[in-house]
Amino acid sequence: MSEDSHSDSATGLSPGADAGTALLAALARDLDRLHAAEPAVRADEPDSVHQMRVATRRLRSLLRSGRPLLERAVVDHLRAELRWLAGLLGRARDAEVQAERGATGLDRLPAADRPPVARRLVRRYRSEYAEAHAATVAALDGARYALLRKQLSGLLAAPPLRRRATRPAPEVLARLLDKEQRRLHRLVTAADHASPSDHVAALHDVRKAAKRLRYFAEAVSPVLGTGHLARAAKTLQSVLGDHRDALASRDALAEAAAAARAAGEDDRPYLLLARFETTTADTALDHYLPALRKIRNDP
């Protein structure tokens, strides 16, 4: 049996499962991911913030894709609260990524240029990460997060399913998946026709749509065997993520160069690293069309 094939023992689903049961099984898996990541975030273990942020985003995305099967008011409330949590984790994660990129960039500089760059750039982001992580842990100890955990568990214990959720899983989930694919293709077309000033934002929309398609394709793979589509969407998401991260780092380096000039320091190391990031962004975009073709040619 291939990894894309249905496995009752792995998913807990019967061959005749309805759409609601399949959706709840996927939500339960992502909720387990969220709970598993929380202790690691509290302990500030490596990559833990990223893992909890992904679990949060997966839950939010799956609730959006599966919204036709659930009472909308419940879904919208939970998605809003998950967005709040993802925002907290995102501030820490973004600072963590920029600190890592800055530390890696130091190796590209002459030894004499590294100390001032490390002081101005890397230490700044590490300090921002520490502050954001502390704020995240404080939120995890708070009443709002405790209520969110309770509500997510309640969603599984007493799911507010709509009538459509009682229909056969393959029929309903295939239609929802097709909707996600068509949404991605519309945004790709919009990006193709975007003006130069709007192109980066349009590509970001494509990335978000690819991520949503990936998460839903992964969630329904036990029913529809869509692991291949999930992998293709993940590739597109990663390509555009690399592009966006490089541009964000380039902009931060440009700001650091301006700050260095204002302080009477040499701005050349920052401008050099900014050029490296521009090249990285351009290289990422070289993989954009091949990644799109993988999705468009998906069997």
Image (spheres, rainbow, N blue to C red):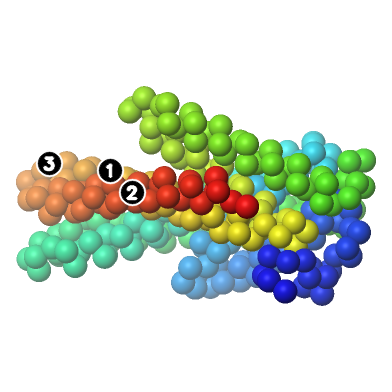
Residue 24 is at least partly visible in this image: no
Name which residue lies at 11% across and 43% down: 261
**Residue 113 place in picture, x, y as percent:** 10, 62
**Which quadrant is the N terminus positioned in?**
bottom right
Q: Residues within 10 Å of mark 3 (few under 14, many from 20)?
A: few
Q: Do the residues under discs 1 and 2 have CB atoms within 8 angstroms?
A: no
Which label sits in the foreground, 1 or 3?
A: 1
Residue 294 is at least partly visible in this image: yes
Q: Which residue is mark 2?
A: 286
Name which residue lies at 61% across and 71% down: 39
Between residues 124 and 138, which one lies in front from this camera angle? Answer: 124
Q: Which label's residue is closer to the chain start, 1 or 3?
A: 1
- Is residue 79 left or right of 282 when viewed as pictured? right
Between residues 26 and 253, which one lies in front from this camera angle? Answer: 26
**Residue 281 place in picture, x, y as percent:** 30, 48
Between residues 284 and 270, which one lies in front from this camera angle? Answer: 284
Which label sits in the foreground, 1 or 2?
A: 2
Residue at mark 1 to residue at mark 3: CA–CA distance? 17 Å
At label 1, the amino acid type is Asp
- Is residue 157 left or right of 214 when viewed as pictured? right
Q: Which residue is mark 1?
A: 251
Name which residue lies at 48% across and 46% down: 292
Q: Which label's residue is closer to the chain start, 3 or 2?
A: 3
At label 2, the amino acid type is Asp
Mark 3 element type: helix
**Residue 275 place in picture, x, y as percent:** 18, 49
Mark 1 element type: helix
At label 3, the amino acid type is Ala
Q: Residues within 10 Å of mark 2 (few under 14, many from 20)?
A: few
